[in-house]
Image (spheres, rainbow, N blue to C red):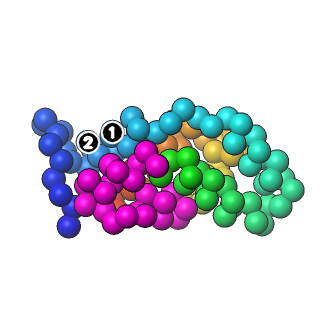
Amino acid sequence: MARSLSTGGTSAPAELRRQLIDAAPVEPEGLRAQLSVAASEDPSGAPEQIAASLAAVLAPSWSPILEGAGSSSGYAKDVIVGARRESWLWVMGERTWAQTASSLAGRAERRVA
């Protein structure tokens, strides 16, 4: 069961999502370009590579926050890897980094709540 966060009047899930969005690093534009090339060369294998790469970028900053909210170790990576479509849409330019981080944060928040 997730532990309550001190929210100062906002709901715990909303606070958790805000914390995750705030902790997201700056858009890794070089990685996006590399993954776009990989996707064009191997469209069937790229979704897993894209998701794993995005998890490597986000999980280090998100794991402590999610674990503090009661999730298990490795949860951040599992959530990010499980959202292959969102990762793919970011690499293909259909989603901004802010949209992608917000969507993934929402996914993580809903599963902790």
What's the magenta bit mostly, secondary-structure-wise? helix
Left of 92 or right of it: where is 16? left
Left of 103 or right of it: where is 85? right
Residue extending farthest top? 26
Residue 103 visible within the image: no
Q: Position of residue 53 (x, y in %)?
A: 63, 53
Residue lying at 38% horizontally and 43% vertically, measured from the top left: 20
Front residue (pair 94, 26): 26
Quarter occupied by residue 96: top right
Quarter occupied by residue 51: bottom right
Left of 20 or right of it: where is 7? left
- Magenta residue check for 59: no
Are there few (<14), some (14-19), or many (20+) residues within 10 Å of tag 1?
A: some
Report the amino acid beneath label 2: Glu
Residue lying at 46% horizontally and 49% vertically, measured from the top left: 60
Residue stretch in magenta: 60-82
The quadrant of the image that shows the C terminus is bottom left
Which residue matches tag 1?
18
Quarter occupied by residue 95: top right
Report the amino acid beneath label 1: Arg
Q: Secondary structure at mark 2?
A: helix
Distance from disc 1 to disc 2, alpha carbons, whole Å, reads 5 Å
Say the numbered circle drawn on residue 15.
2
Q: Position of residue 61 (x, y in %)?
A: 43, 45
The quadrant of the image that shows the N terminus is bottom left
Residue extending farthest right? 41
Residue lying at 26% horizontally and 42% vertically, measured from the top left: 15
- Magenta residue check for 65: yes
Left of 69 or right of it: where is 28? right
Say the numbered circle drawn on residue 61.
none
Query: Do the CB atoms of the residues marked 1 and 2 lie less than 8 Å apart?
Result: yes
Residue lying at 55% horizontally and 54% vertically, measured from the top left: 55
